[in-house]
Image (cartoon, helix red, strand yellow):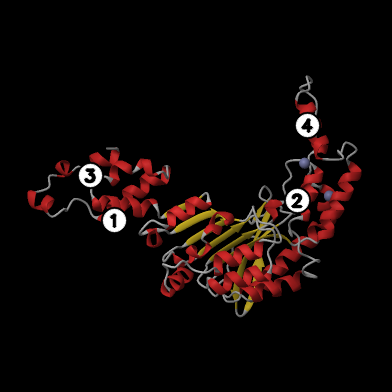
Amino acid sequence: MPATGSILEPNSMNLTRSDRSQGFFFPSEILDEIVYHILSSNHTFSTIEAFSRVSFRFRQIALRSFFAKLDIYSKAHWINVCGITGVYSWTRELSSLSTSLSSAPGNLLSFQDIRTIELDFSNEGLNTQHNRATQIFLGRPSSCSTLGQQISTRISLTTLRLSYLPRIDTALLALISGNFPALKILALTCSERLLDDCCWDCYEEASSCTTHSPIPDMYCNAEDLSVAFGSALSPLRNLQSLHLGIYLSEMEIFYYHIYHSDLNSSLRPTNHSTTIFNLKATSSSSNSNSNPPWSLVPYGPNMCSHCDYLYSEDVRKTELYASASIARFLPALKEITWSSFFAQDNPGDDPDEGSTMVWIRRKEGKIRVRRAPW
Ligand SMILES: [Zn+2]
Ligand SMILES: [Zn+2]
């Protein structure tokens, strides 16, 4: 018996025979807290297995606490979990790859009291994203779920995070807002697919597979984008925090950066294999004082003083404008975060994450925004 055993040992509590015959040892709420505390440092069932063997009541508490947080790592895991009696009422948080749910996507709507869902779309592409999202959020429900359960899921969900999305568009936003009207936190991220850990060719390739800067190809300007996004999200009357992981800088800025970085970098390799060769050659060099091959490693406009000088002022104005514009459609919105190449030294800016947060204040029918709490 682990540490919990000594705490829960009936003899150590001076219980009367009557108490023990009635099974009165500890209130369930306290047992829940103990198991929650144990799982918070190591969420594996082995840490509470001995506890779960004490009695039927302890086993129920252990299972309820363990399955409150689900991390689905494969299609088979998802199928197995969905076959466990009780899991649909125990789970409060679920995280998964989008593809892992594809074996039985409708089962997600059977979780009656789920509060937080986090899905990683890194295995999806521009052509598969919409179908996968529709399959998961609007899919044919499992045979065991009732209409009441599906409604319960949609009403209980308050936090939704979708990461590594190929794009953020009105079809996705309308799908979310139409199905989960009680959302308070919505985080959709896209720009992290711009991987800068290999070579310039891979950087450009990742850019072509991701709509990280939708202006002007998808929306002609920030006004167009904010009206489209705000309208699609308008059913979310309780939404307080919105994270949109896209850049509001125009796509041409990104292309121009690639172009002038190319001109400035005489060492820029011609392809992926050249980079790997050069990096290996440099790392194995006997001269430990040689400069690192920075010119070989791609970098975005966020690391470029030239782009910062040319564009940061206008882009930062655009970010404030779009924030205020979207806030018109979402009456409870308090903060909005964008991906940004031009984060600076402000409370809302995070240069490491490449993001900028804008706080919203409403007074006398007017909306005001700034990059610090009001
Ligand atoms: Zn640049
Ligand atoms: Zn590469």
N-terminal label among 4 and 2 = 2
For the question of whether residue 276 can be seen, the reply is yes
User: Which residue occupies 41% across, 43% down?
Assistant: 44
Question: In the picture provided, is 12 more to the left or to the right than 160?
Answer: left
Residue 245 in percent (x, y) is at: 67, 59
Secondary structure under tag 3 reads: helix
Q: Residues within 10 Å of mark 4 (few under 14, many from 20)?
A: some
Estimate how packed mark 3 is, as few (under 14), some (14 to 19) or many (20 or more) residues with alpha carbons within 10 Å: some
Q: Amino acid at mark 1?
A: Glu
The residues tagged by marks 4 and 2 sit, at their Cα atoms, a distance apart of 20 Å
Looking at the rendered image, the disc whose residue lies closer to the viewer, 4 or 3, is 4
Q: Residues within 10 Å of mark 1 (few under 14, many from 20)?
A: few
Q: Which residue is mark 2?
A: 206
Q: Tag on residue 29? A: 1
Answer with mark 1 or mark 3, whichever residue precedes in sequence. 3
Q: Which of disc 2 and disc 3 is earlier in sequence?
A: 3
Q: Give the position of the C terminus as an image quadrant.
A: bottom right
Find disc 4 in the rendering and name its residue: 279
Give the amino acid type for the residue marked by disc 4 in the picture: Leu
Residue 261 x, y percent position in the rendering = 86, 46
Q: Is residue 345 visible?
A: no
Does the CB distance between marks 3 and 2 fall below 8 Å? no
Q: Residue at x 38, y 62 (%)?
A: 89
**Quarter of the N terminus within the rendering:** top left
For the residue pair 260 and 181, the one nearer the viewer reads as 181
Mark 1 to mark 4 CA distance (whole Å): 57 Å
* Residue in front for this viewpoint, 239 or 152: 152
